Image: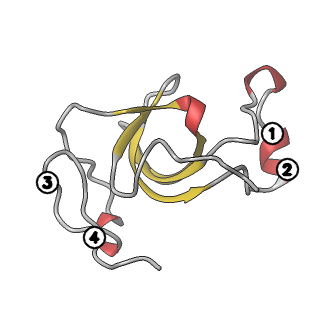
Amino acid sequence: MLKTRAKYGLGQVVRHRKHPFRGVVFDVDAEFSNTEAWYEAIPEESRPAKDQPFYHLLAENDQNYYVAYVSEQNLIADYSGQPVTHPDLGDFFGPFEDGQYPLHFNLN
């Protein structure tokens, strides 16, 4: 039985440790659950371990909005108090409050 616990929660604002982007967590995989092709495309010296939570983010940088899939080891909490402006946030979350985004709906 997998005993991994996610460090970051749904609606939390996070940023990447190495790359200049931030985003809002909208889903979490208890361990790697993407394709092998995606994983192999990461340079070997930078590949994260698969046995940790991976986060789906509504991400943004200075030029783009996109969905990112990031390992827990590569994220840090963003306490800037600045909202994320990804255009799809309203599909999942309510307005930014107290440093995070509340879910629009309950999960099972």
- Determine which of the numbered discs, if any, sits on residue 77 in the image: none
Q: How far across and how far down the image is residue 65, in percent? A: 41, 52
Closer mark to the observer between disc 4 and disc 3: 3
| Relative to 103, residue 46 above or below | above
Sequence-wise first label, 1 or 3:
1
Return the residue at label 4.
Answer: 90
Return the residue at label 2.
Answer: 37
> Are dots 1 and 2 in contact, CB under 8 Å?
yes
Q: What residue type is labelled 4?
A: Gly
Return the residue at label 3.
Answer: 97
Sequence-wise first label, 4 or 3:
4
Query: For the residue labelled by badge 3, is the local secondary structure a helix, a strand or a loop?
Result: loop
Q: In this image, 76 relative to 68: left or right?
A: left
Q: Distance between the residues labelled 2 and 4?
A: 31 Å
Q: Quadrant of the N terminus?
A: bottom right
Sequence-wise first label, 2 or 4:
2
Tell me which corner region of the image, top left, top right, bottom left or bottom right, holds residue 58.
Answer: bottom left
